[in-house]
Image (cartoon, rainbow, N blue to C red):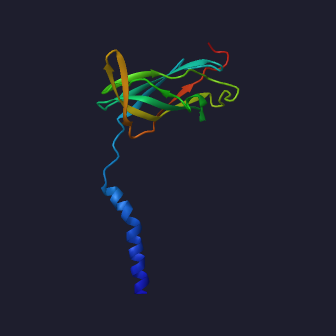
Amino acid sequence: MKRCLGFTLLLFAFLNAPLASQEAGEEKTAPALTISAVHVEPANPAADTLCRLRVELDNTDPRIASQLGFAVKINGQELPVYSNHLFMFPVSPGGKSELALYNFWSTETSRQMPATGKLEIEVVLREARWMDISTEGETEVWKPLGDVGGLPVSRSITLEMAKPGSN
């Protein structure tokens, strides 16, 4: 009985050890590159409306970020155009930058008018790289410095769609 109790206590200590070390470890820090806002125009699209999509990015790091990989979901359906595209847009250090993403249609054959009358748009920043951008002679040179940590990050927005026949 003592042997069984000893084994049980040892097993309990072993299984709980990683949890204790995780609690004592450092807290997760906020990522240095985040999406601070998602903008869609028009703000109340009707069915079959071409919508303009933009994001505001915050970079709190002293380095430039670029090679931005996004995922965009509309009412839970991922837009395939983002799956293999990186935006080579420099996000300035220590501030906000605005980036235009791809326009999209409020409804399509594969994505009908939602019964709720709401258009839910989620933008995910999946990946990014820190960059050193310098000029050598007359040539601009971009050197990757490593992956941006703390990704993916996301931001969502929900739009009320215009009722059919309202202008």
Which x, y percent locates residue 139?
A: 36, 17
Residue located at (60% from left, 31% from top):
80
Judge whether 142 appears above or below 42 on screen.
below
- The residue depicted at 63 percent of the width and 31 percent of the height is 116
Quick one: 135 or 50, which is closer to the camera? Answer: 135
Q: Quadrant of the N terminus?
A: bottom left
Please provide percent x and percent y for residue 24: 30, 57
Q: At x 32% / y 25%, what residue is drawn?
A: 95
Q: Residue 39: x and y, percent?
A: 48, 23
Q: Would residue 66 appear left or right of 112 to someone viewing this image?
A: left
Residue 79 in sight in this render: no
Residue 149, position as x, y percentages in the image: 38, 40
21 relative position to 153: left or right = left
Determine the residue positioned at 44% across, 83% down.
4
Q: Extreme front residue here? A: 137
In the image as oriented, which residue stretches furthest toward the bottom? 1
The answer to which of 14 and 74 lies nearer the viewer is 14
In the picture, measured across the screen, residue 54 lies left or right of residue 62, that is right
Seen as rendered, the residue at the extreme right is 109
* Rendered position, 97 above or below 61: above
Quadrant in the picture for the C terminus? top right
How many badges with numbers are in the image? 0
Q: Residue furthest top?
A: 167
Q: Is residue 69 visible?
A: yes
